[in-house]
Image (cartoon, rainbow, N blue to C red):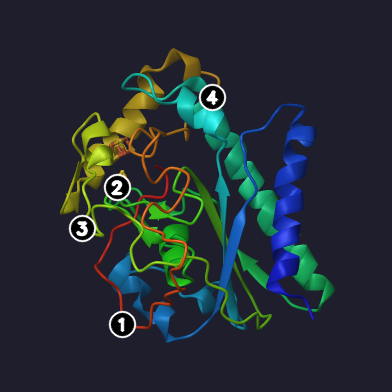
Amino acid sequence: MISVDDLRKSAETCVAEEPGRLGSAGWWQPPLLAAAPVDSRFDQLPRMAAADHLHPTDLLPTARSVVVFYIPFKPELVKENKPGQRPCRNWGVAYVQTNELIGRVSLAIKELLATGGFDSGLTPATHNFDPMRLMARWSHKHLAYLVNLGRFGVHHLLITPAGCTGRLGSLVTEAALGEHPLIKTDEACLLKAGRPCRKCIEACPVDALSENGFDRTRCWQRLNENYQVLDCFSDLPASTDVCGKCTTLMPCSFKNPVAKSKSTIVVLKKNDFHEEIADLDEI
Ligand code: SF4
Ligand code: SF4
């Protein structure tokens, strides 16, 4: 039987081999991976994310588990993206290369599961959303929340035990993998946990964030504008719509700042969602 640990090792190997494949130092730290059974919690995706969000069984009718992984960026890259109001070139390069890496990790896990006779369903890392409503039909972020890989921050990104400055990928499989949560607190954002912070709100160059909301149109316009105005992005694909200022060198960038060493794992039950949170996976 293939275990979640086997999937984790496969993802780790794939991420570790990527710099050698590219002939560069790479941008990535070892990935995290969580899984959960396909149960009624996923019925709430249309309410949580987008009205036409796909159910895991839409990807694969025989799906029994959802697997979500998170690939954190190295601190050097994040530090490089801190100065100024626009992203640095390497932030854009890392975005493009990580999209490809997410595809490779997903495929490696699919192939591993196939050796056990299990089929899997994959989706693209990004750009699977409605350009008018700016809502994903398959939101890696909301799936990561539902499998307890992390919790949402005020910046509307997922904060995992390894922070929020990285990228998510997900797949469904007919293997029954069981419940494998990773987050250990019921909140992972300082502000949401009742502690002072607001750093992401203050860092946003277009005031798209507030304690109670997220102006997704304003954010999306900024991401597109960045590609248009940055000469250093001219050789990158037009889909390189990035910013990342609200995740760069924040208290939640590389860890769950709410975590305490003796905390116990909190698994959200169905209907136990804190709020309806819209999606924008490209941040
Ligand atoms: S920067 Fe602070 S307020 Fe913003 S998401 Fe992170 S912990 Fe929460
Ligand atoms: S990605 Fe940039 S524009 Fe969007 S909310 Fe974060 S800081 Fe603001």
For marks 2 and 4 on the same chain, the one whose residue lies earlier in the sequence: 4
Specify the amino acid type for callout 4. Asn
| Residue that carries the numbered disc 4 in the rendered image | 90
The residue at label 4 has a CB less than 8 Å from ligand 2: no
| Residue that carries the numbered disc 2 in the rendered image | 155
| Residue that carries the numbered disc 3 in the rendered image | 194
Please tell me whether mark 3 or mark 1 is closer to you in this view. Answer: 3
| Residue that carries the numbered disc 1 in the rendered image | 271
Specify the amino acid type for callout 2. His
Give 33 or 53, whichever is nearer the viewer.
33
Give 3 or 225, whichever is nearer the viewer.
3
Indicate the position of residue 165 as horizontal and vertical percent values. 46, 42
Indicate the position of residue 276 as horizontal and vertical percent values. 25, 66
Q: Quadrant of residue 98?
A: top right
Specify the amino acid type for callout 3. Gly
Label 4 element class: helix
Is residue 237 visible from the viewing direction of this image? no
Q: Residue at x 62, y 43 (%)?
A: 29
Q: CA distance from mark 3 to mark 2?
A: 15 Å
Please tell me whether mark 2 or mark 4 is closer to you in this view. Answer: 2
Indicate the position of residue 214 as horizontal and vertical percent values. 21, 49
Horizontal side, residue 24 vs residue 196: left or right: right
Disc 3 and disc 4 in contact, CB within 8 angstroms: no
For marks 3 and 2 on the same chain, the one whose residue lies earlier in the sequence: 2
For marks 3 and 4 on the same chain, the one whose residue lies earlier in the sequence: 4
